Structure formats: C-alpha cells, structure tokens
Image (cartoon, rainbow, N blue to C red):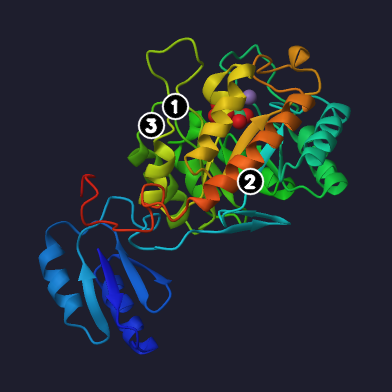
Amino acid sequence: MFVVMTAGASEAEVLGVKSRILAEGLTPFDHQDADHVVIAVVGEIGARKPDLLEHFAAMPGVDRVNPISRPFKLTSREFHPEDTVIRVLDAVIGDGSLTVMAGPCSVESREQLFETADAVKAAGATILRGGAFKPRTSPYAFQGLGVEALRYLAEARERTGLPVITEVMEPSQVDIVAEYADILQIGTRNMQNYSLLRDVGRVARPVMLKRGYGATVEEWLMAAEYIVSSGNPNVILCERGIRTFETYTRNTMDLAAVPLLHHLTHLPVIVDPSHATGKRWLVRPLAIGGIAVGADGVMVEVHPDPDKALSDAEQQLTPDQFRSLMEALVPVHEHVRGLHGDPFLAGAATGFGADDGLAKH
Ligand code: PEP
Ligand code: MN
C-alpha cells in the first residue's frame, strides 16, 4: 500500500506515518514527487491490511491511502510516477536520449578492446561494454580474462571517456567489479540470484538487470525490487530475449515487454538484440524495432573480427556494420521521440492503474 501525504504535510507528519509503519514491523520508503510525499509500506502486511488502511487514512497530514498495489512497490509507477534518469559520467540513461552500449562480448586483449572502443565511440556509442567474467554454457569454453579485463576496461574509459559496463557473476566479485566498472551488469542466468541482487543493491553504481531467459515480466520486476529495496535506486532493465519453442533464433525478443515495462515501472529499458537473436544479420532490424517501440537504448556486441571472436562469434557486428546501424537508429529514435504524445506509446504516463487490464495483487 502507498500512503499519499497532502501537499502541505509537515515533516513531523511524514515522520509520524513512518514511525507508525516501523512500529508495525514494516519498512517505509518515501518518495517526493512534484507536490507531495508518497510513502510505500513494504513488508508482510497480510490480514492487518484493512486495519492499517483505516489507521493511516486517519493520521494527520495523510491525503489518502492507496491499497491497490502490485507485488513490486518501489519499482512501480504508482509509487514513483516520473521516469528514473541515471547519470554515469557523460552518459544519461532514461531522459529521452538514445543510449547505445556497444563493445565486444568478451574482452580478449587490450588491443582488441581499444580498437573496438575507438570504433564504437567514433560511431556514437555512449557506453562501452565488454565481458570480463563470462557466464558460459560450457565449463570448457573461454571464461573471460577476469581482473585483467577489468583493468583494460578502465584504461578504455580513460582513452575514450565512455563509461564502461561489465557483468558481475557472483557476490564475491561485486567489490572488484564496482571498483573498475561504472555500471554493473547482472546476466540472464543470475536474474534470480537473490544474494547477488542484494549485494549489488548495496553499491554506489548503477546496475543493469538482464531479463532471465525464463522469467515473466513480473518476476523480472521483483528481481529489480531486490536491488532497489537494498538501497540502489539506479536500475536499468534489459530485454535480451526469452526462451520459446523457436529455434531459428537464439532467443525470442519480447518487444511488447518494452512498452509494458514503461507502463509498469519508472526504470529505463534497454534492448539487447545481439543475445536475443544470436544472428548478426538480425541485430539491425531488432535494434531498430526496440527503439521503435520506445526502448531507452540498445546494447549491441561489436568485435573487430567477429568470426575470430572467443565468444558469440555469430552475433557480433563489425565496426562498419555498427556504424551503419547507428546511422539507421538515430533518425528512428528522433522520430519515435516525436510520437511521445501518442497515447499508445505513452501508456506509462496516462491512466495508470484504473483499467490497464493487468492483474492486481
Ligand atoms: C552478455 O551480455 O555478455 C551476456 C552474457 O548476456 P546474457 O546474460 O543476456 O546472456
Ligand atoms: Mn555475448
């Protein structure tokens, strides 16, 4: 439930509500929007709900109590209506600009990373990606250069000015990855690794949470809720394809998830057509598709010589293909921005909650 304070509520009245929530063994999270404070009541409320609703509604400074809430609270639009905007060095994610994360699947050497970093920067990428710790299906496949790759990523940031994103696979790696990288990535296989989610919730770095390949949108948002409720509000969601019965593509890219998420949550949404399709020639149309349905950006794998890549050789773009993709994406993004008043695309901003046909919990 959410307690909505009146526009003129005093600090003491807000504190009064929060103390009452704490006294019930629950946790208050407050958010100041344009004109009032909203307090989310988080925890196992159970059968106390009717009594608590009545109690909070009668407290001084309370405008109303909203009992309708989804299982995800802090990540929901109900609690936080305006978009979350994340700033990392010169990159801004979620403000309507086009975020482009590009770079190799795996960091293979300093030269390979620098060559890719220079090329993607020149073509207009805003964030450099590169895997240091690699989650591979086979234990015999290349597992990444580890800390050596983290050092190269930090050097590539110095060289290009681009913030860097890389995956953290386990709790013991969180501190070292956070020391070198600007954004921590949680991979699809770890979306429900709750101890890892809590640990990245405690660091002062944005986190990009990839969708579990078998996860529903609600499970994905609950995973994001772990990070935000642990203290880190800067979460980016990345649709990277889900597993279906289709075998021509590596995964099935769920484009509908993009506007759906913009409706349900204030967090920025990125699409990754590289892992979603697994095929180089499908990356371009799906990247364009992702931006056309309103994604805040794309993540694309780029390698100087994709056929020789140590991982994901079939899906990485050459620098030339990436440049050409950027030339196509920028005007699509400009055009889609101009459509933001369209009620179909702007579902997030309009009519939330009343009749959206989504299950309430
Ligand atoms: C990656 O982006 O390097 C990666 C391994 O992706 P995913 O977790 O989506 O498979
Ligand atoms: Mn990859």
Q: Is mark 2 within 8 Å of ligand 1?
A: no
Secondary structure found at label 2: strand
Q: Quadrant of residue 64?
A: bottom left
Q: Position of residue 195 (x, y in %)?
A: 47, 42
Q: Which residue is mark 2?
A: 99
The numbered mark at residue 213 is: 1
Q: Position of residue 262 (x, y in %)?
A: 42, 49
Specify the quarter for ligand 2.
top right
Q: Residues within 10 Å of mark 1 (few under 14, many from 20)?
A: many
Q: Which residue is mark 3?
A: 215
* Residue type highlighted by circle 3: Ala
* Alpha-carbon span between mark 1 and mark 3: 6 Å
Q: Are marks 2 and 3 in contact (CB under 8 Å)?
A: no
* Alpha-carbon span between mark 2 and mark 3: 24 Å
Quarter of the rendering occupied by the N terminus? bottom left
- Residue at the (57%, 26%) spot, across then down: 285
350 vs 101, left or right, is left
98 vs 45, left or right, is right
284 vs 51, left or right, is right
The relative height of residue 288 versus residue 161 in the rendered view (above or below) is: above
Q: Is mark 1 within 8 Å of ligand 1?
A: yes
Q: Position of residue 175 (x, y in %)?
A: 66, 47
- Residue at the (35%, 34%) spot, across then down: 216
* Residue type highlighted by circle 1: Tyr
